[in-house]
Amino acid sequence: MFDRLGSRLESIFKKLRGYGKITKADIEDGLRDIRLAFLESDVNFRVVKGFIESIRDKAHGEKVFESLTPGQQLIKIVKDEMIAILGEDADEIHLSEKPPTKIVLVGLQGSGKTTTSAKLGIRLKDNETKSLLVSTDVYRPAAQEQLQSIAGRSELAFYKKDSDDPLKIAQNALSYAKKENYDALIVDTAGRLHIDEEMMQEAAEIQKKIKADEVFYIADAMTGQDAVNTALTFHRKVPLTGVVLTKLDGDARGGAAFSIKAVTGVPIRFIGTGEKTGDLELFHPDRLVSRILGMGDVLSLIEKAEQKVDREEAEELAEKMMKDEFTLEDFRKQLHQIKRIGPLSQIASMIPGLSKSTAFQNLDLDDAGIKRVEAIINSMTAEERSNHMILNGSRRKRIARGSGTTVQEVNQLLKQFVQMKKMMKKMVKFGFKGKNGIIDPSRFM
């Protein structure tokens, strides 16, 4: 999502780093470019104005001009101010001392409330907290069935409606949750295509009646400033405790993330990074800023890998990479490991400098590309997977026919394989191989 903003800031900082000394005029030129970069990313103009003024004050106050590395000093100020805009440190769900913890989700239709209900349930489940999901949406066709289906696939409990009154559904679900000793009740409220008084009043009544511990506004990052304005309207009617920003893996400009806390005063608590029920992350402002600025986000990558990667298999593959014994069969296994963690572009953005490397940019390994690669490797014999050097012209033609691809695509894979070996070797270098397993977090501290 933040690729464009990151690229703009990178070019601005590259210019500033080139100066031995920085003048006031240089700083003003840089601030003007930064201002335009944020406005083009759909950040609220009042937020941008305050952001630039704060940077200007600190740039002068911290004696950037006399610094040995003035460009880096200014970059640090910009980074700190970006983190300040995004809000507090990571903040988990606040569990009530008297279960169940009541969590109410509000927002517009299509923002991702229903999917987020299950994502929150999965997150609580991973922390050994038993949740009950309920939908109070009695208006949208199949709303109940949708949440029930997602809950079933995620092995989460679902409360079937026993009334056509949203308020009674919520109350009855709460009584059931208490009776069956659930730790949390997650209430998915009804949404509309646009803000209306009836929707907000209903959400406010549910929040008051069940005495909600958490009220999360589900904001679709793709809607930009509309998400900010809607959050502000909801907050005035239903006191929000946090925002869950969804579809952060999309191609929106990302202005909502930088505006929502500053405009509403409500912190972003979680971010949705994909469509799967496990794609919900605790929001770390400092990590997101580091990712945008091309400084990586190794800590988040460590957490993802520790949750989803087979440690023994990854240890074995890392050993082979280090010894340059990595084969196409190992490549196939590594692709399975990568798919568990997330999209390759997302992984690369977490490793400092990797996404900008020539080796990575020459790869064509999106989801469709990975499936094509797997089909090609599956069409090879065990001997060919063990030694790609024996793949002559006739073998490549046979593999192309067997995988439904072309010889050119097979050739491209072999070229990518060599590049991937280099890239994965770099990942090992960045800490994916430690004495106690696949990851050594101390290398990043």
Image (cartoon, rainbow, N blue to C red):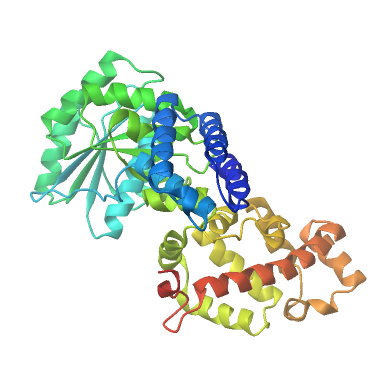
Left or right side of 294 for 205: left
Residue, x 70% and y 55% (percent of image)?
A: 361
Give the percent coordinates (x, y) of residue 184: 19, 47
Left or right side of 129 for 350: right
Residue, x 51% and y 52% (percent of image)?
A: 70
**Residue 44 in view here:** yes
Figure check: 298 above or below 153: below
Give the percent coordinates (x, y) of residue 303: 40, 63
Which sits in the foreground, 86 or 163?
86
Which sits in the foreground, 392 or 53?
53
Figure check: 264 above or below 70: above
Which sits in the foreground, 179 or 199?
199
Residue 237: which quarter of the image? top left
Give the percent coordinates (x, y) of residue 419: 72, 67
Give the percent coordinates (x, y) of residue 229: 37, 22
Picture quarter with the N terminus = top right
Figure check: 85 above or below 152: above
**Residue 109 in view here:** no
Residue, x 77% and y 60% (percent of image)?
A: 403
Picture quarter with the C terminus = bottom left
Residue 56: which quarter of the image? top left
Figure check: 89 above or below 412: above
Q: How many marks?
A: 0
